[in-house]
Amino acid sequence: MSFIFQSQPIRYDLRKVLKPGARVAWVASRYRDFMKPGEIVYLWLAGESKVRGIYGWAEITSKHPQPDANGIFRVEITYRRNFLSHECGNHLTIDEIRSNNVLASMLILRVPVGTNFLLSDEENVEICQLIREKYGEDWLPPTRKS
C-alpha cells in the first residue's frame, strides 16, 4: 500500500523542509487504518501549476497514527528522497503526472482536498516508472514484500 501526503506551500513548504533522514509527524486525517511501518508515502506540494507535484518520498516509521495534544491524529514518517537534490533539480511536475493515463485520474487530481490520499497498486507502479525514467533506479522506493 502507498499514499500521497499533500502539503500547502503557505503551511508546510516541501521545497524548504524535505531533508532525507528527518522524521516528522504528519497529519493522518484519512486512511489511518491502512498506515503501517514501511509503507511508502509520496510527498505532494499543492499550489500553482508550476510548483504542484511530487517532491520526494518517505516511509511510515510509526506503528499506528496517534492523536497529539490537540486530538489531531499524526503518523511519523521519515523522509528518504528529495527530488530537488537530484542533478536534474526538479520535482515530478503536474504536467508529467497528468500525461500518464493511469495517474491522470488519481483522487488528488480529481478532488485535491485533504492531507492523505490512498494510491492503488497500479498508480504506485506508474509513479515508480516516472521516478525511474526521470531520476534513475537509485531514487526508487523499496518494493514492499507482503
Image (cartoon, rainbow, N blue to C red):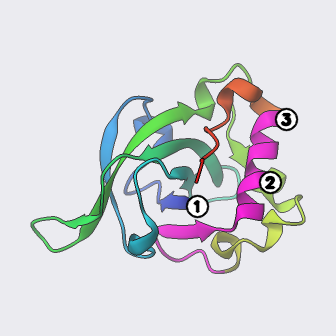
The residue pinned by badge 2 equals 126
Question: Alpha carbon of mark 1 to alpha carbon of mark 3: how far?
Answer: 22 Å
* Residue at the front extreme of this rendering: 146
Mark linked to residue 141: none
- SS at mark 3 in the image: helix
- SS at mark 2 in the image: helix
Magenta residue check for 98: no
Report the front residue among 8 and 56. Answer: 56
Q: Is residue 72 above or below residue 8?
A: below
Q: Amino acid at mark 3?
A: Glu
Res 139 quadrant in image: top right
Question: Alpha carbon of mark 2 to alpha carbon of mark 3: how far?
Answer: 11 Å
Residue shown at the point (69%, 68%) measured from the top left = 120
Q: Amino acid at mark 2?
A: Glu
- SS at mark 1 in the image: loop
Say whether residue 89 is visible: no
Q: Position of residue 105 (x, y in %)?
A: 78, 74
Q: Residues within 10 Å of mark 3 (few under 14, many from 20)?
A: few
Q: Position of residue 43 (x, y in %)?
A: 54, 50
State if disc 3 and disc 1 touch (CB < 8 Å): no
Which of the two discs, 2 and 1, labels the residue nearer the N terminus? 1
The residue pinned by badge 1 equals 1
Res 71 quadrant in image: bottom left
Q: Position of residue 116 (x, y in %)?
A: 48, 68
Which of the two discs, 2 and 3, labels the residue nearer the N terminus? 2
Report the front residue among 51 and 54. Answer: 54
The residue pinned by badge 3 equals 133
- Comparing labels 1 and 3, the label whose residue is closer to the camera: 1
Q: Which residues are magenta?
A: 111-132
